[in-house]
Amino acid sequence: MLRWLILPLLVIPLSWVLLTGFSVNPNEVPSALIGKPMPSFSLQTLSGETLDSADLAGRPVMVNFWASWCGPCVTEHPLLLDAQRRYGDRLAIVGVIYQDSTDAARAFLDKHGDGGYPDAVDEGSRLALDFGVTGPPETYFIDSSGVVRAKQFGPLDAPALQTKLAMIGVSE
Amino acid sequence: MRALLLPVSVAALLALGALALFTALQPAVAPTRVEQAARLATELRCPDCAGLSVAQSTTSSAATIRAEINAQLAAGATPDEVRRHFVQRYGEWILLSPTSPIAWLLPIGLLLAACVGLAAWLLRWRSPAPAAAAPVAAAELRRVRDEAEALDA
């Protein structure tokens, strides 16, 4: 009797561990910020203005960490430009330049298009550390009450963008 | 030569024991802030590296974390508070050693269970169970008894 129990007792948990283990990206770090308020900040933008997180209150926000040296950021960029066109004032998009020079960031926008939304300069990666960023591109979705609701690890694609925007109350 | 082996071994063991006792009885010296910062840097994972600690990495994020550790310790935060500061932002992932006791106890438990299982299997393998006597049919038993009685007669 015991012999017949041993096999399923070993096989079922092992299969479960393997199935769940292989279905997640081991490099992906789940955000500790989900359900918590967005870190506050006050940063200079590429155009020389000051961007304060308090100014974003009451609107859904999408914070995108990017760099000119990051290949996947190039792939993702048209999607951000499209989101800015499509949602306009209903969504505040904030780009945060991650470990990059302002000259290189400006050259990137000249080449790939400037969406018109602010791109903040994060000296010493302080805001990136407050958000728990591990590398660009990474995007955080904050609802209109200022709570972080979702994170995109790596480049966004259209379905992921739509799903995560819906989580902060932004839809077509 | 062999006669010396026992006294030398005993002396070595005694010396080791004395050293351990001496170390254990040493008054604990509070680590300096620089030592605390260096230790914290070895415990925290560099966010944009592959498997390196903040102490080992030269990236800008690692440098910022090292500066943040120093700033927080200088402002009077305890090492635990500094650790918590980073865990709140990155989750437990930022710590290079897991804090959950399960992570440490599970492998030991599995190893012990495997040893017990192996020992039980080896013991069974070394002393095979005696073969059970085959049941004897009643008719057969009666026939043998009859034959025995016939022989006695």
Image (cartoon, coloured by chain):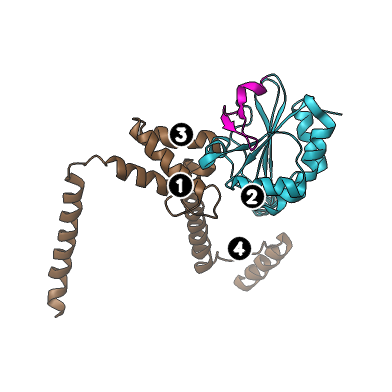
Chain colours: A cyan, B brown
Labels 1, 3: one chain: yes
Q: CA distance from mark 4 to mark 3?
A: 65 Å
Per the model, the C-alpha gap separating discs 2 and 1 is 21 Å
The residue located at (16%, 78%) in the rendering is: B2
Magenta residues span A38-57
Residue at (17, 55) in percent of width and height = B19
Whichever of labels 1 and 3 marks the residue nearer the N terminus, that label is: 1
Q: Which mark is residue B132?
A: 4
Looking at the image, which is closer to me, B59 or A12? Answer: B59
Q: Amino acid at mark 2?
A: Ala
Q: Mark 3 against mark 2, which lies toward the viewer? A: 2
Quick one: label 1 or label 4, which is nearer the N terminus? 1
Asked if the residues shown at circle 1 and circle 4 are in contact, with their CB atoms under 8 angstroms apart, the answer is no
Instruction: Calculate the distance from the C-alpha at mark 1 to the C-alpha at mark 3.
Output: 19 Å
Residue type at tag 3: Arg
> Which residue is under mark 1?
B63
Name the residue that disc number 2 marks.
Answer: A104
